[in-house]
Image (tube, grey):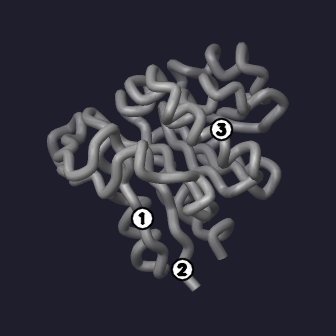
Amino acid sequence: MGKKVAVLLTNDFEDVEYTDPAKAFKEAGHELTVIEMEKGKTLKGKQGEATVTSDASIDDVKPEDFDALLLPGGFSPDQLRADDRFVQFSKSFMDDKKPVFAICHGPQLLITAKSLEGRDATGFKSIRVDMEYAGVNFHDKEVVVCGNQLVTSRTPDDLPAFNREALNLLK
């Protein structure tokens, strides 16, 4: 049975870090809901390769309506973490031990949610120090799975491993 995956996204997301996992998740029978500040907004990737329309407003969804959370990278996570609604939404998944998939700059939302202390994780090299200050046991590896809950990767090059491990947790 397919799982419901929440995706927190806004403009300037890293195109392939949304499109590649989205394709893999949908092919495996999972349902994605793109959540932004407003429903029906057209979101553009920072590479100009992907355009996505948001399915829901953050005000109209609850973490308990979803089985897992996807946090693509790019500039999207940094913008979203300035909004407490997105931070709290992300924190709920970590607190409830639901699967969370964060790639590249995706962990920035989890840093702001103060949900990474003591966790094994990775991310894009420019946020490594931020992650370490947040108490992360940082690993420079293509994919890190922590506590059978959190899947993190560094860059688009890591997407095959990221998707594989995320799909394993969704089984």
Q: Secondary structure at mark 2?
A: loop
Q: Is residue 147 left or right of residue 5?
A: right
Query: What is the three-letter code of the residue carrying label 2?
Result: Gly
Q: Secondary structure at mark 3?
A: helix
Q: Quadrant of the C terminus?
A: bottom right
| Residue reaching furthest to the front | 60
**Residue that appears at 56% across and 62% down:** 65
* Residue ID for mark 2: 2
Does the image show residue 156? no
Q: Quadrant of the N terminus?
A: bottom right
* Residue ID for mark 3: 91
Evaluate if marks 3 and 2 touch, with contact meaning CB atoms under 8 Å apart.
no
**Residue that appears at 49% across and 35% down:** 86
Query: What is the three-letter code of the residue carrying label 3?
Result: Lys
Of pointers 2 and 1, the one earlier in the residue sequence: 2
Query: Which label lies toward us, 3 or 2?
Result: 3
> Residue 49: percent from the left, percent from the top?
17, 47
Of pointers 1 and 3, the one earlier in the residue sequence: 1
Above or below — where is 16 with respect to 128? below
> Residue 22: percent from the left, percent from the top?
39, 62
* Number of numbered discs visible in the structure rendering: 3
**Residue that appears at 41% across and 74% down:** 26
- State the mark number for residue 32: 1
> In the image shown, does 92 or 28 lie closer to the viewer?
92
